[in-house]
Amino acid sequence: MPGSLPNPIFYFPAKVAIYSLAGWVLNKVYQSGPNPLLFGILRVAIGFGLGFLLLFAIEPLTPKPNTTSYADYVWLGSTRLLVWAGMIWFFYERKNVSPLRLFIVVISGILLSFGIDAAFAWIDDEFSGMFSIGMC
């Protein structure tokens, strides 16, 4: 959504809810883990925090405002890789590491994150910017 940002009134609670559900599923898979709501809140907070930090790091690579470039995908992909890998390792894998399971769960988390954003972009297009706010 060039030129706009997701409306935090809809976007943050939706992401917390979906990531909390993911935390619940992970707790079932690993048979332990943090409170799913805590997992969802941390996933959103860490993701947005690290995303903003990395955004400033790649800003010089972006060609011009309001366009999508490869740097945008590097930014989104690297942020998601770092957050998912870090959270899965910290909450679930550090006591009993399984490289294949870690890989599958991290890739699934990254795909979930891209899926959430794609769904919000589609809904935003269908409802004429209802779920986004313009950037100043």
Image (tube, rainbow, N blue to C red):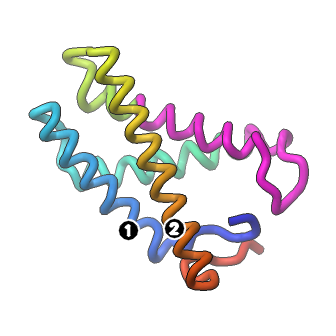
Front residue of 100/96: it is: 100
> In the image, residue 38 lies at what x, y percent?
26, 51
Residue 37 placement: quadrant = bottom left
Which of the image's four quarters has the N terminus?
Answer: bottom right
The mark found on residue 92 in the picture is none
Q: Which residue is mark 2?
A: 120
How many residues crowd mark 2 within 10 Å: few (<14), some (14–19), many (20+)? some
Residue depicted at 26% across the width and 32% down the height: 91
Q: Main secondary structure of the magenta part?
A: helix
Residue depicted at 67% across the width and 43% down the height: 73
Residue extending farthest left? 31
Tag in front: 1 or 2? 2
How many residues crowd mark 1 within 10 Å: few (<14), some (14–19), many (20+)? some
Q: Which residue is mark 1?
A: 13
Front residue of 80/50: it is: 80
Q: Which residues are magenta?
A: 57-85
Does 61 sit left or right of 8 as displayed? right
Q: CA distance from mark 1 to mark 2?
A: 13 Å
